[in-house]
């Protein structure tokens, strides 16, 4: 067996050293009546070549964004991944290490995480951040629990324009808590501050928004912040990190806790995971943060050094009083994001955001010029927008586009029955004018 | 040995104005005015500050950082409870196939049948290994699996009109167990261990109530011992209507030998990143699928991947489901690696893993027995604990000192100070993938460290001396938190 380091001949020697006759004797503590006594009902072992063929054939049965031109978004985006990200993040020194509990043996990744933390703080405009969460949805739920603990209040308001899956996850997490969730209606796509104000009361722990929201629209975050702060509650915002190259960071707008999905920062779409959740906050909430934190310190000779810190918040020390149960996080994905941000740099980060903005606006302007199609919402948007098909079933658009080798967008009906005639279209910097025109042609062919 | 005493400058200290590591395209569409499209209050007031570096420098930076690491590929890594086995390269090859990496979670299922088939088959393999009826692949890590499972248990009771909110946990449990319960709104009651390190059945009988929802056990437990009373524990719980949860972090010891479902376990989690060889990535990503008995299956997260009429589909029609715990469907890339691994090994290979993991641990335990205290006698399962109590009492050398000294020998230290019930604890898990030569070398080094504790204790206090930094001041790090670099304003 290729993965075992011990040869059959060595087994004998080892058993003799231990002083037992057979390997089976070592399992004597498992009561005989519980022992399986036969092989599991699993397939036969596979040789490397057959295994490669099998996996290749599975992979080849997919038609993903490697073969099709994608305008799918909704929390997972086809952004450019600089090859340097793969090259460096696949170094096995990073890939095959564990959590850096032994600081002296892990200075490399501790420094990389410290740099990651710094760059997340810079792009969000927040004071502190941790070294990653699983993904945006569960990070949002953890932010809500954090707000509950900070405020001691029991109600949370969530925009109807927050990713429906994130809302579902918050609901699941709160199902066993004495908390209530109310949805802030967003018929115009964005949150209306006056509507929000009427929903806030002295039990409101937090308002949860997404910016840009699930529909791609930009919300008046500054005014939303004023409304909730007037009632001494907290503002939690889910952000798309790519947007922060162009639009205002949550720190600038008064957000208290920021969470986000780091997938656009150099991670493959990978059918939904692994992704990279992040969470950043005002410094007042530092000790409430879940997850691992890396700090800069010195070694005993005064040299710069890094280590895990403030661990008394965490499960391995504080157990049932920990700020969260999270242990394994998304370390390697945070390394990818750090490499991505370093490679992009100040100029690249802005350019990517600007290209997304320009191409999305070009696509939208072309599509709305076609009879039968309009934008569902008038609010300003960033790289994603909702197209309403006034005359033709959305499925027809998706089908025709697919015939042309395009993934036109994400239909919204399963989450928003009232938007059954709508399609969420995302345009990243990867889409060329020709590709966008090809999508526009599909609409034109249908609309006539 | 000469010390590498130069810092690697932070990215921000290397920044050179105007540099960038990428070549992005010119805008090929007519440009719109950003300031006309977006209100100025919502636009970034100043450009985000990020390092400015050419690709060459980015590459050098992260390559040099990677050289300041210990890893499974380069070092023996007997980190107990973490199962730091070798991560076969074919797993990485498979996970990197563009057909897998390029899938979007909201694609039409027709376009993504290959990935769904892989998930469905992995589900079945994990169901068989657990001896339980249904697996959910949603949870993102072990702790997330625990949380999901506790939610499932709660939903099960609520469905029966009960509101049980108490969970029993042995004193040997991993910290995530009580933390997951708390996150799920449950109260934790600790059950004592016997002097033999197993669940104290009398204490269990005394602490179980009609409000007990579940007991979470780890078996083999964190001392590396298989609790032979597992069936009895299950019976005690089931008589009171409570559920038995298995923390499956230690499945590497028992897969192919005994199935949790056959022991009366109702629900468990796997750590794909331990048992099934997916790499730990400096702390993640992992994946924590859960397996449940039939009566809990209706409460699993939705959607479930299913196979209907010759086609792989998402089953959203699960009215009793707890809902979603994670965006999309789970850590797909991790699933590809675990699936590849299980298919490579097959039925006989899976059993061979636990055979060899247990053999290696017992062999190593035997070799260390003359020099260190083994608080629980051998045989052990896939890991064992030693105590450095003798070294501490006689020579003032603590488990931490031994750990740091191992680093100087190019060996990643075992888990230290866990489980909490053993003083000066070192938890050693060699895994099945290490060679006899490596095990012998480790034993010889541990012997030498024990002898040096007597002859030259200063060595241990000074260690490590071969690393880029000497012992790190963790107290200062916590007292004066510096969690990010600050640009000079
Ligand atoms: C016994 C045990 N349970 C649970 C966990 C938590 O798993 P994860 O880190 O994947 O969340 C661990 C991991 O360290 C463990 O060793």
Image (cartoon, helix red, strand yellow):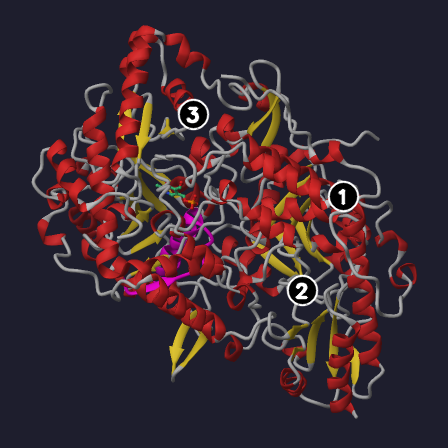
- Pointer 2: residues within 10 angstroms few (<14), some, or many (20+)? many
The answer to whether residue A163 is left or right of residue B432 is right
Q: Is the Cβ of the residue at disc 2 closer than 8 Å to that at disc 1?
A: no
Give the Cα distance between marks 2 and 1: 23 Å
Q: Nearer the viewer, mark 3 or mark 1?
A: 3
Q: Earlier in the sequence, mark 2 or mark 1?
A: 2
Q: Is mark 3 on a helix, strand or loop?
A: helix
Could you tell me how many numbered marks the image carries?
Answer: 3
**Residue B372 vertical placement versus B207 (above, below):** above
- Name the residue furthest bottom: A448
Q: Which of marks 2 and 1 is in front?
A: 1
The answer as to whether the residues below labels 3 and 1 share one chain is no
Q: What residue sits right under mark 3 in the picture?
A: B407
**Are labels 2 and 3 on one chain?**
no
**Element at label 1:** helix
- Disc 2 target residue: A160
The C terminus of chain A, quarter of image: bottom right
Q: Magenta stretch: give its range.
A: B132-160
Q: In which quarter of the image is residue A166?
A: bottom right
Q: In this view, does A236 lie to the left or right of A3?
A: right
Q: Mark 1 points at which residue?
A: A251
The picture quadrant for ligand 1 comes to top left
Separation of residues labelled 2 and 3 (CA atoms): 52 Å
Q: In this view, does B249 lie above or below B436?
A: below
């Amino acid at each position: 067996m290729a993965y075992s380091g011990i040869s059959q001949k060595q087994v004998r020697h080892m058993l003799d050293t231990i002083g037992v006759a057979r390997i089976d004797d070592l399992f004597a503590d498992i009561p005989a009546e519980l022992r399986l006594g036969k092989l599991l009902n699993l397939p036969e072992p596979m040789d490397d070549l057959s295994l490669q063929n099998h996996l290749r054939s599975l992979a080849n049965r997919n038609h993903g964004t490697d073969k099709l031109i994608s305008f799918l978004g909704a929390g997972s985006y086809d952004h450019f991944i600089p090859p340097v990200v793969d090259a460096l993040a696949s170094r096995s020194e990073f890939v095959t290490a564990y959590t850096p509990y032994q600081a002296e043996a892990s200075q490399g990744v501790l420094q990389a995480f410290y740099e990651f933390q710094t760059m997340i703080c810079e792009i969000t405009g927040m004071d502190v951040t941790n070294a990653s969460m699983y993904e945006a949805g569960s990070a949002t739920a953890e932010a809500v629990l954090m707000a509950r603990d900070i405020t001691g209040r029991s109600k949370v308001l969530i925009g109807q324009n927050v990713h429906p899956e994130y809302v579902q996850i918050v609901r699941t997490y709160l199902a066993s808590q004495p908390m209530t969730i109310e949805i802030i209606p967003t018929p115009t796509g964005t949150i209306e501050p006056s509507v929000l104000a009427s929903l806030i009361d002295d039990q409101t722990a937090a308002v949860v928004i997404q910016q840009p929201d699930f529909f791609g629209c930009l919300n008046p975050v500054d005014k939303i912040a004023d409304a909730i702060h007037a009632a001494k509650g907290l503002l939690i915002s889910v952000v798309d990190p790519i947007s922060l190259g162009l639009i205002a960071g949550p720190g600038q707008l008064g957000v208290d806790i920021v969470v986000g999905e780091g997938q656009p920062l150099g991670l493959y779409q990978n059918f939904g995971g692994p992704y990279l959740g992040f969470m950043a906050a005002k410094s007042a909430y530092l000790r409430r943060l879940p997850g691992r934190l890396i700090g800069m310190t010195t070694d005993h000779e005064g040299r710069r050094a890094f280590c895990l810190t403030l661990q008394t918040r965490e499960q391995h020390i504080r157990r049932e009083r920990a700020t969260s149960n999270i242990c394994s996080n998304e370390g390697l994905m945070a390394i990818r994001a750090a490499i991505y941000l370093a490679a992009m740099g100040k100029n690249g980060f802005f350019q990517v955001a600007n290209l997304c903005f320009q191409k999305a606006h070009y696509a939208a302007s072309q599509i709305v010029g076609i009879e039968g199609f309009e934008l569902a919402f008038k609010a300003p948007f960033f790289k994603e927008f909702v197209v309403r098909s006034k005359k033709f079933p959305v499925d027809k658009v998706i089908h025709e586009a697919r015939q042309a080798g395009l993934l036109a967008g994400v239909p919204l009906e399963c989450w928003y029955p009232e938007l059954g005639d709508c399609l969420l279209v995302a345009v990243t910097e990867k889409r060329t004018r020709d590709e966008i025109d090809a999508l526009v042609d599909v609409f034109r062919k249908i609309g006539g | 040995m000469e010390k590498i005493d130069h810092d690697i400058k932070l990215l921000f200290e290397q920044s050179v104005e105007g540099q960038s590591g990428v070549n992005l395209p010119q805008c090929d569409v007519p440009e719109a005015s950003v300031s006309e499209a977006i209100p100025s209050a919502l636009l970034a007031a100043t450009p985000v500050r990020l390092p400015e570096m050419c690709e060459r420098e980015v590459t050098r930076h992260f390559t040099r950082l990677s050289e300041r690491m210990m890893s499974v590929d380069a070092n023996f890594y007997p980190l107990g409870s973490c199962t730091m086995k070798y991560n076969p390269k074919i797993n990485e090859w498979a996970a990197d196939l563009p057909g897998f990496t390029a899938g979007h979670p909201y694609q039409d299922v027709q376009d993504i049948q290959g990935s769904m088939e892989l998930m469905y088959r992995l589900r079945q393999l994990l169901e068989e290994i657990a001896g339980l009826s249904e697996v959910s692949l949603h949870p993102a890590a072990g702790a997330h699996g625990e949380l999901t499972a506790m939610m499932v248990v709660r939903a099960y009771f609520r469905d029966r009109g009960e509101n049980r909110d108490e969970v029993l946990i042995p004193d040997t449990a991993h910290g995530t167990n009580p933390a997951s319960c708390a996150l799920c709104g449950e109260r934790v009651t600790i059950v004592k261990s016997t002097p033999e390190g197993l669940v104290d059945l009398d204490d269990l009988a005394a602490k179980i109530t009609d409000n007990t929802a579940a007991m979470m056990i780890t078996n083999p437990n964190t001392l590396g011992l298989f609790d032979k009373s597992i069936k009895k524990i299950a019976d005690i719980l089931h008589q009171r209507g409570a559920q038995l949860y298995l923390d499956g972090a230690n499945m590497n010891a028992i897969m192919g030998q005994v199935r949790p479902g056959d022991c009366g376990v109702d629900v468990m989690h796997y750590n794909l990143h331990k048992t099934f060889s997916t790499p730990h990535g400096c702390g993640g990503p992992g994946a924590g699928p859960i397996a449940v008995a039939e009566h809990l299956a209706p409460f699993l997260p939705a959607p479930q991947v299913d196979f209907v009429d010759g086609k792989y589909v998402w089953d959203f029609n699960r009215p009793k489901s707890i809902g979603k715990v994670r965006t999309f469907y789970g850590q797909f890339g991790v699933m590809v690696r675990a699936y590849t691994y299980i298919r490579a090994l097959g039925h006989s290979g899976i059993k061979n893993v636990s055979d060899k993991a247990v053999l290696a641990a017992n062999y190593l335990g035997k070799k260390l027995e003359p020099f260190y205290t083994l608080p629980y006698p051998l045989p052990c399962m896939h890991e064992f604990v030693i105590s450095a109590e003798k070294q501490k009492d006689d020579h003032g050398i603590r488990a931490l000192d031994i750990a740091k000294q191992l680093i100087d020998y190019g060996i990643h230290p075992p888990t230290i100070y866990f489980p909490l019930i053993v003083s000066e604890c070192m938890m050693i898990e060699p895994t099945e993938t290490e060679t006899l030569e490596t095990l012998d070398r480790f034993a010889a080094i541990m012997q030498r460290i024990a002898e040096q504790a007597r002859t030259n204790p200063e060595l241990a206090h000074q260690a490590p001396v071969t690393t880029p930094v000497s012992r790190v001041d963790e107290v200062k790090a916590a007292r004066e938190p510096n969690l990010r670099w600050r640009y000079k304003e």
